[in-house]
Amino acid sequence: MKVSQLIIITWFMLLLGEAGSEAAAQAAPSRSASAAKVGSAQPSAASLAGAPKRVVFFGNSLTAGYGVDPKRNLPSLIAQKIDSAGLNYKVVNAGVSGETTAGGLARVGAVLRQPVDVFVLELGANDVFRFVPVPEIRRNLQGIIDAVRKKNPKAQIVVAGLQIPGDFGPGYVTEFQSLFREVATKNRATLIPYLLEGVGGVPELNQEDGIHPTAAGYKVVAGTVWHTLAPLLEARTL
């Protein structure tokens, strides 16, 4: 294996917090300030008049918020934007550091014990440094979406697109980066083309590892996500 390949594999292990116990600790549910404490609502709560709808962020350390204060991770920033917009949603941070698509498929059932109205799926990059074949990644992502739709047929799926360096080979890179649009199109889901737009590769917006966003970086990421998410939430409120 080339030295450059070993370096880039290590890069991805750092990126998605393979040893990120800090991010795992931060993977507790996040919510808007006006919402009830996450986990306290019973499954029937969604049927109550005026009950807030639920937005679930389901991903790895990029969702969990590795290395930043829990109030400054992506789900928390989106919850703040929801509050500012006066929308009746609460946000759940279901990110786990080091998560793969296979791991996500195994645990999604536990997340679905409560109703979901909007499900933001951010997984796949941790599979890359394991050289998991793209068809397998696709099957796992589809399995997660199928599980969400089975429990919540009217749930809106949002797929967060990811990018990887060219060191993995042009064929693998192209196939990986195109799979998010393919999955979104197949499932009539909303696509965020690139989650780290404007942040990936920008030193001042990333932590010392050069990979995970800083608090300032997460503000940019939240802006990217909100650009896609806000119209969707507003439409579902009507």
Image (cartoon, grey):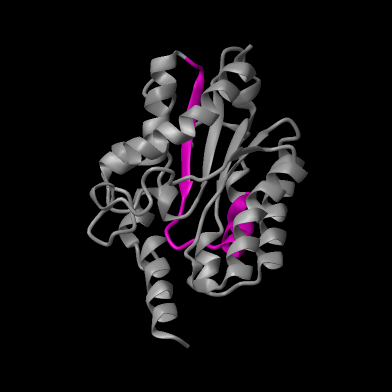
Q: Residue at x 47, y 55 (%)?
A: 60
Task: From the top left corner, tell me how far across and down residue 82 is, in percent.
Answer: 44, 22
Q: In this view, does 204 lie to the left or right of 57?
A: left
Q: Which of 218 and 172 is in front in this view?
A: 172
Provide the residue span drawn in magenta: 87-109
Q: Which quadrant, please, contains the C terminus?
A: top right
Which residue is found at the position 55% from the left and 54% from the top? 123
Number of marks in the rendered image? 0
x and y, in percent, of residue 64 in the image: 40, 49
Tell me if 52 is positioned left or right of 79 in this view: right
| Residue drawn where x is 44% and y is 86% of the image | 2
At a point 63% along the width and 30% down the height, the residue shown is 117
Q: Is residue 99 magenta?
A: yes
Q: Is residue 199 visible?
A: yes
Q: Of 20 and 160, which appears nearest the observer?
A: 160
Residue 30, can we see it?
no
Q: In this view, does 100 lie above or below 108?
A: below
* Residue 104 figure quarter: bottom right
- 35 or 154: nearer the eye? 154
Tell me if residue 107 is in the magenta stretch: yes
For residue 44, which quarter of the picture? top right
Q: Which of 200 and 24 is in front in this view?
A: 200
Give the image location of residue 37, x and y in percent.
42, 30
Figure quadrant of residue 74 = top left
- Residue 18 lies, in percent from the top left, at 40, 67
